[in-house]
Structure formats: C-alpha cells, structure tokens
C-alpha cells in the first residue's frame, strides 16, 4: 500500500508555508475569541458567524467599489467595522443584560446569536457561492524552495504577526486594554474604583468580534464564501483556544500554528484524512496538558 | 416493576397518557405516528443528556457524539456483518458507553467550561472520522436503506418499539435518579467541594454518570436507526448536540421529566415551522433568547413553580 507519496524537501517546505499562512488566518480569528474568553470568560459560539459575516461583507463592499485594488482594501478595512457594528447591537440590546447570570446562559446566548446570524446571512446574501479577487499584485505565485507559493499567502504571513503585535500593544500598553485585563481578573474591584464594567465588557466583546470580521475579510479572497463556513471555523477556533490556554493570546498563536501546520502536513501525507490530523494533535496535547500549553488567564 | 414507582399522585395522568399513546397509532395519520416516534427518540436522548447536565451539573456539550456512535454501530453491524439484528441492537449502547468512558476519562479531569470544550474537541474527532471515512461510514452521505426486521420496519412498528424502549429506559433512569447514587450526583452538582470534603469520590461519580448517560444515548441511537432507517454524520455534529442541550433547558434542567417536554416542543415546532419557513434555525435562536431571558427554569420548571406540586415545594424547603 503506497498511499504516502514520496515527499521531497521542497514539498515539505511549501506545505509548511501553506500551513503557516493558514495558521495566520486562524490566529486572527482565534485571537479575537481568546480576547473575549479572557475578559468575559465566555466562549463566543457566534464568533464563526461573525467571521462569515466579515467574509460576506468583504464580498459586498468589494463589489460596491468595483473590485480591484480599491475594492479589496476598502473591504479589508470596512468589513471588520460592519461586523463590530453587528456585535455592538447584539451586545447592547441583549447580551449586556446577562452579565450577572451564570456563564452557561451567556454561552447559550451566543449559540442563539449564531443560529440567528446564520439565517440572517442566508436571508441577505443567499446560499450561493461567492468569491472575491485579490488585487493584481497579490495574484499569482512566487517560487520559494522550488515550489510555487501564492503571493496572497505572503501577505497573510505579514498580517498575522501585525495583528499579534497590535493586540499585544493594545492590551498591555493602552489604558483601556489594561482595564479590560483587570476586569477579567476581578470584575467587582474594577467596578468599585468607578469604572463602568459593562462598557468594558462591551468593548472587549466588540473588539473580539472585530477580529473575527478581520479574519473573515482576510480569508475571503482565498476561499469560496458560503453559508456553512461558520460551522467549520468555530470548532477549529474552540480547539485552538483550548489547546493554547483559554484567554491567552499567545496561546491562540501557538494553537493556530499547531493546527495550521498539522492540517497542512496532513494534506501532504494522507489527504483523505487531513481533517483528522489537527484533531489528533489536539487530543494528544490535551492528554499531555489538560488546560492547554500556555497558562490560561482563568 | 411498573409505573408504580412514580408517585401515587401522578399515577393517574401517566396511565392516561400511556393508554393514549398505545391507542393513538390506530387513529392518527401515518405522518403523525412518525413525528411521535421521532419525539420518542429525541426525548430519550434529551433525558440521557439531562442525567449529566441537569442532575450532574456537567457541561456535556457533545452528547450527540455518543448518540451518533450508537446509531452508527447499529447501522454498520446491520449492513457490514451478517450477525443477527439483535446483536447490533444490544452492542450499540455498550459501544456508546465505552466511547463515553474513554472521552469521560479525559473530561472529568477538568471542570466546567474546559470540560465542555474538551468534549467538543473529542466528539468532533469522531465526527471528522465519520465524515471522511467514505469506504467505511459512507462519509457525508451516511448509510441508507439499513435492513431492519419486518416487525419494526414499518412506521407503526417503529413507533411501538420506540415507545417500549422509552418507557423501560425512563423507569430505569427514574430509579437511578432516586437512588443514593442519583442523590449523590445531585449533591455534587450543588456543591462539589463539600462533597469532596465528606469523602465522596467526585470524579468517579461523574464518570459513572457519563457512562450511564452515554449508554442511554446509545439506546436512543438504536431507536434513531429503527425510526429513520439511515444514519448520517450530522448526528455527530456539535450544533445538534447544543440543540439537545437547548431541549433540556426548554423543558427544565432540574426536573426529571422536563427534557421529554422540551424534546416534544422542539420536534413539533421544527416540523410545523418547517412547513412554512426555511428559517427554522432563526426561530430556534429567537426561542432560545426568550428562554434565557424569561424562562430560565424551563417550561416544566415554570409550571412546577407556578402551579406548585405541593410535594416538590416541601422538598425544596427541606433542602433550604
């Protein structure tokens, strides 16, 4: 049985790069989820739906401005804000009234949000497959390690670390970021010194969803945009934040890298079961370290 | 043992309901018989989930995985082997319980949300395998046209088979619920630290509860195959698992029979909403939000609170 094809060094390297760029997308999405987890201590089940809305919004915005370079950049900048607006509405109208309740209710609320947003997307955009084009200079591929590598993926490889550094600077160097981290540790204390905790939570939630939208906009040129993409990403995001350590941003990075690279190597070694490899990696890691690789903020 | 184990007061309504359920198939159209059979399956599944969620206080987020494992076991044994049918029927709950034990072993080391997220991960692994392994599980198409004995292959046959299995399972579950083990489990739910302090092995109790619950989920899986005659990976998908979770919430976590009501309401709503609209999940979402805000105790819990079964109230007071 020779179902493992001969693997050359260049194939290894190019799959590593593909895995890395996939990991960057995953990181952008999961860093947002991790941020919400860290501050609100709620796994946002609707995170995948917001990611999907980000991708669909990118499609619409890009079309509105006639595609091309302008359309792409405007879509990339504007669609996260569209998603942030959606999440702000949901948060201020309903979610914020639940902060005093037990966490399970918060989680179930985000599940309800996922169900509603999923159907809203179906109503607004329909069930067709959509795609958008990256601008001219991101199309095609460059040769790295004797193997073609899409230019757009190079862009992703730059964007991931940028988001990581930005988020780190934000939560460690700005006042609001510090307040958010403090509220995660001791909500009552933060409230006692005169800070409106509800708005801090709102801010954290919206920022997390903003990142989901950014992830959706970033992934849009590489995949076919369709309903159902929320279900796939959310379970991956759950796994990643779990193995990384709940609420730890660098944990999200580590988890994304593990997930992206095992998936990509899985495609190389055993294409049919590529989907199983990352799950297996997750199982092994959780047996080894039940609460994730890095320290959870909980 | 018969229905006598239920309190004397509720004996009348339960007997009436049973008689009605036995007679119904001869008067209602076939479609409704089918819907009722689906409700039986789902009710059993929701009840088994509630054993760990409502009574055990565990975040069993991926219960559907065990249901699916049970259903797939039956389907595979009936289509791929020439063993007698009943072997598959008996094996399925045990396989489900075994998988429950395996996954439970890892999960009980963790608490609360970590428990739930780890379970979603491990359950999704099972889903991924079923989804991709075309040559064995049929991949995303699933397995159709599973050969069933003629006695239970008709809708009415499946209905009675489901009803009997449901009743037996409910009686066993009720006995467990009322047993010292059930009481300990509920005590662990209410205060795990204190239980640990008085020398109860919390993790072992939780693990046993998971195994029992997954066993019943396996039975529900068998019933699913009997009613539908097919299996598909959606059974193992986490969204469906959360839907079962919502059924428990809808009926009422902390009541014994609540999940049956929850399952019945959900299945009826889905069936009849499905006729008029394709946006069933949105309705479900809105319903869930309404539940969270206005009816966190569930329908049954609300009825108990509102119209008060005296017995339960006095119990509550004792507990306080």
Image (tube, helix red, strand yellow):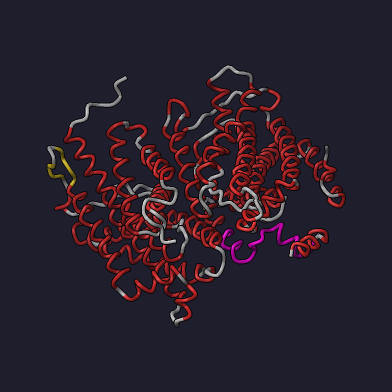
Which percent across, then down, holds residue A209? Answer: 38, 62
Q: Residue at x 55, y 42 (%)?
A: B64
Which percent across, then down, holds residue B139? Answer: 44, 32
* For residue B93, side relative to residue B3 (left or right): left
Of residues A245 and A140, the one drawn nearer to the viewer in this rendering = A245
Magenta span of residues: B287-308
In the rendered image, the quadrant that contains the N terminus of chain A is: top left
Q: Residue at x 23, y 57 (%)?
A: A159
Of residues A252 and A147, the one drawn nearer to the viewer in this rendering = A252
Which percent across, then down, holds residue A28? Answer: 31, 57
Q: Quadrant of residue B319?
A: bottom right
Outermost bottom residue: A194
Q: Residue at x 67, y 48 (%)?
A: B264
Which percent across, then down, holds residue A74? Answer: 24, 63
Q: Is residue A127 visible?
A: no
Most prominent secondary structure in the magenta stretch? helix
* For residue A230, side relative to residue B183 (left or right): left
- Asked whether B62 falls inside the magenta stretch, the response is no
- Asked whether B300 falls inside the magenta stretch, the response is yes
* For residue A214, side relative to residue B275 (left or right): left
Q: How many marks?
A: 0
Q: Is residue A138 visible?
A: yes
User: Vertical placement of A185 versus B252: above or below?
Assistant: below
């Amino acid at each position: 049985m020779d179902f493992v094809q001969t693997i050359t060094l260049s194939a290894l390297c190019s799959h590593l790069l593909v895995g890395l760029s996939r990991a960057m997308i995953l990181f952008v999405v999961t860093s947002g989820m991790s941020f919400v987890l860290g501050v609100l201590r709620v796994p946002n089940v609707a995170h995948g739906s917001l990611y999907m809305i980000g991708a669909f919004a990118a499609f619409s915005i890009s079309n509105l401005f006639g595609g091309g370079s302008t359309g792409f950049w405007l879509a990339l900048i504007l669609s996260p804000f569209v998603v942030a607006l959606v999440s702000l509405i949901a948060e201020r109208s309903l979610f914020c009234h639940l902060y005093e309740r037990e966490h399970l209710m918060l989680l179930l609320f985000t599940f309800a949000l996922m169900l509603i947003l999923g159907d809203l997307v179906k109503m607004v955009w329909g069930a067709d497959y959509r795609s958008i084009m990256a601008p001219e200079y991101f199309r095609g591929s460059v040769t790295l390690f004797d193997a073609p590598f899409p230019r757009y993926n190079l862009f992703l490889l730059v964007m991931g670390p940028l988001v990581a550094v930005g988020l780190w600077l934000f939560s460690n160097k700005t006042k609001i970021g510090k307040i958010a981290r403090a509220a995660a540790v001791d909500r009552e204390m933060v409230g006692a010194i005169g800070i409106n905790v509800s708005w801090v939570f709102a801010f954290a939630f919206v920022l997390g969803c903003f990142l989901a939208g950014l992830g959706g906009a970033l992934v849009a040129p590489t995949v076919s945009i369709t309903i159902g993409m929320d279900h796939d990403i959310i379970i991956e995001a759950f796994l990643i934040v779990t193995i990384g350590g709940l609420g730890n941003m660098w944990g999200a990075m580590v988890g994304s890298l593990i997930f992206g690279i095992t998936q990509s190597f899985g495609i190389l070694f055993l294409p049919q079961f590529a989907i199983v490899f990352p799950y297996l990696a997750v199982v092994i890691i959780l047996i080894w370290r039940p609460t994730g690789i890095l320290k959870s903020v909980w | 043992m018969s229905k006598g184990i239920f309190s004397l007061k509720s004996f009348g309504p339960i007997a009436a309901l049973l008689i009605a359920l036995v007679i119904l198939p001869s008067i209602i159209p076939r479609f409704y018989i089918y819907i009722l059979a689906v409700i039986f399956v789902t009710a059993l599944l929701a009840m088994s989930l509630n054993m760990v969620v409502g009574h055990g206080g565990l975040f069993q987020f991926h219960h559907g995985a065990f249901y699916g494992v049970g259903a797939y076991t039956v389907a595979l044994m009936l289509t791929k082997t020439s063993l007698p049918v009943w072997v598959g029927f008996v094996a399925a709950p045990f396989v489900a319980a075994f998988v429950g034990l395996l996954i439970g072993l890892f999960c009980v080391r963790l608490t609360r949300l970590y428990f739930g997220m780890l379970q979603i991960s491990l359950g999704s692994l099972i889903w991924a395998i079923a989804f991709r392994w075309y040559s064995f599980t049929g991949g995303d198409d699933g397995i159709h046209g599973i050969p069933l004995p003629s006695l239970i292959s008709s809708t009415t046959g499946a209905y009675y088979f489901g009803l009997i299995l449901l009743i037996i399972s409910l009686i066993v579950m009720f006995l467990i619920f009322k047993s010292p083990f059930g009481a300990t489990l509920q005590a662990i739910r209410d205060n795990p630290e204190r239980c640990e302090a008085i020398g109860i092995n919390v993790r072992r109790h939780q693990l046993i509860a998971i195994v029992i619950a997954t066993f019943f989920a396996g039975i529900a899986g068998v019933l699913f195959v009997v009613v539908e005659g097919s299996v598909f990976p959606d059974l193992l998908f986490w969204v469906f698992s959360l839907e079962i979770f919502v059924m428990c919430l809808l009926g009422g976590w902390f009541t014994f029979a609540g999940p049956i009501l929850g399952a019945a309401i959900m299945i009826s709503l889905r069936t009849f909403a499905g006729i008029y609209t394709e946006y069933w999940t949105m309705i479900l979402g809105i319903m869930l939000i309404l539940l969270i805000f206005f009816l966190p105790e569930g329908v049954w819990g609300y009825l108990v609170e509102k119209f008060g079964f005296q017995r339960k109230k006095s119990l509550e007071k004792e507990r306080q």
